[in-house]
Image: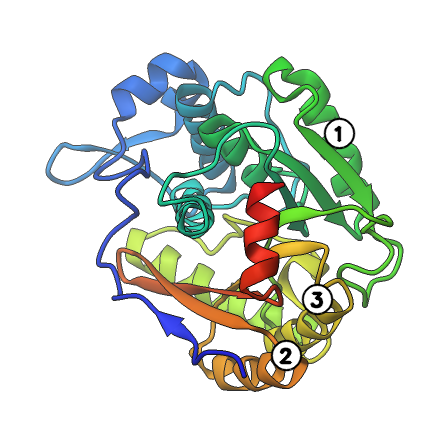
Amino acid sequence: MPQPPHSATAPTTLHPRNRHHGRYDFAQLVQASPELATFIVSTPTGDASLNFADPAAVKALNRALLKQFYGIRQWDIPAGYLCPPIPGRADYLHYLADLLADGNAGVVPTGKSIRVLDVGVGANCIYPIIGHHEYGWRFVGTDVDTTALRVGKQLVASNPTLTGAVELRYQPDGTAIFSGILKPRETFDATMCNPPFHGSAAEAEASTRRKERNLATSRGAQPTSNFGGQDRELWYPGGEATFLWHMAEESALFRESCYWFTTLVSKKETLPGLYKSLQKLGAVEVRTIPMAQGHKVSRIVAWTFLNTAQQRAWREK
């Protein structure tokens, strides 16, 4: 029988190794990426800030952060595609590193021998960029969107630091997760995913409009789409719970191909059903890892089908 889902104490801030604690240092960011200066505004107290309701400003901030902290010289995404908040994405990778360290005598495994599968890599390639820079891991990113993959491949080719570290694969089946992607006898130390959590295009649109109105009201601006997102980045038939049910079902088909399967879970209401599915599928261990960034609380759910002997053999290999 699997162990009850293990849950760590909820943090109150970003992971200790996260490079993005505290306020953004806009002076340093502008030095790294001068174009950001166009979007800097002053707060009523005279501090430098950014109009986060402006999608161009958010993209410029990401470009500056990637230049300053991760050595990425060329980064861009098409209009309307997801422009993710980098501090939160970095947190996922640092907690994933801790998870892998638990099976490695407490030492985070680094280098190209560690392979990670990023389900839904998107045009931005944020997880491979940060994961390779911080830990030297190799990534395979998958997506159902051909435009996202084309842009992602251009991004990888434009940055020599990513050469040989990132491979992008097309997922032709919009309902599949691992099937059609994993090759025979191919193995990964971990998978990761930021799943779409809305159940329909209409639901995603309503949520986006609500967030935009709230952000615009708080900053005295007109509503606009700042972080963006295409259909399959934001919604999946049945929502987050259905997507993760499919992920759990497919993970069982590849139970010996991966040490840890992991995913972000946005809604706590999704957890009981996911735990129940994993228990039925025979997961040996399930862990829940809380994350926090300001008032935003999320969590990673990780599971493995490998028993103690298989885990030991994996580490030795």
Q: Secondary structure at mark 3?
A: helix
Q: What type is the residue that disc 1 sits on?
A: Lys
Callout 1 touching callout 3 (CB < 8 Å): no
Left or right of 309? Residue 30 is left
For the point 49% across and 26% down, which residue is it? 133
**Residue 234, x across and y down, in percent:** 63, 62
N-terminal of the two: label 2 or label 3? 3
How far apart are the two marked residues, 1 and 2, measured between alpha carbons?
A: 37 Å
Q: What type is the residue that disc 3 sits on?
A: Ser
The answer to whether residue 262 of the structure is visible from this angle is no
Q: Quadrant of the C terminus?
A: top right
Mark 2 vs mark 3: give the one in front: 2
Left or right of 50? Residue 180 is right
Query: Looking at the image, which is closer to me, 166 or 285?
Result: 285
Residue bearing mark 2:
282
Structural crowding at the residue carrying mark 1, measured as other residues with C-alpha within 10 Å and reported as few (<14), some (14–19) or many (≥20): some
Query: Relative to residue 175, is residue 3 depicted above or below?
Result: below
Q: Secondary structure at mark 2?
A: loop
Q: What type is the residue that disc 2 sits on?
A: Gly
Structural crowding at the residue carrying mark 3, measured as other residues with C-alpha within 10 Å and reported as few (<14), some (14–19) or many (≥20): many
**Residue 11, x across and y down, in percent:** 25, 59
**Residue 77, x across and y down, in percent:** 64, 35
Disc on res. 251: 3
N-terminal of the two: label 1 or label 2? 1
**Residue 45, x across and y down, in percent:** 10, 38
For the point 49% across and 86% down, which residue is it? 272
The answer to whether residue 264 of the structure is visible from this angle is yes
N-terminal of the two: label 1 or label 3? 1
Quadrant for residue 22, please give it: top left
Quadrant for residue 123, please give it: top right
Residue bearing mark 1:
153
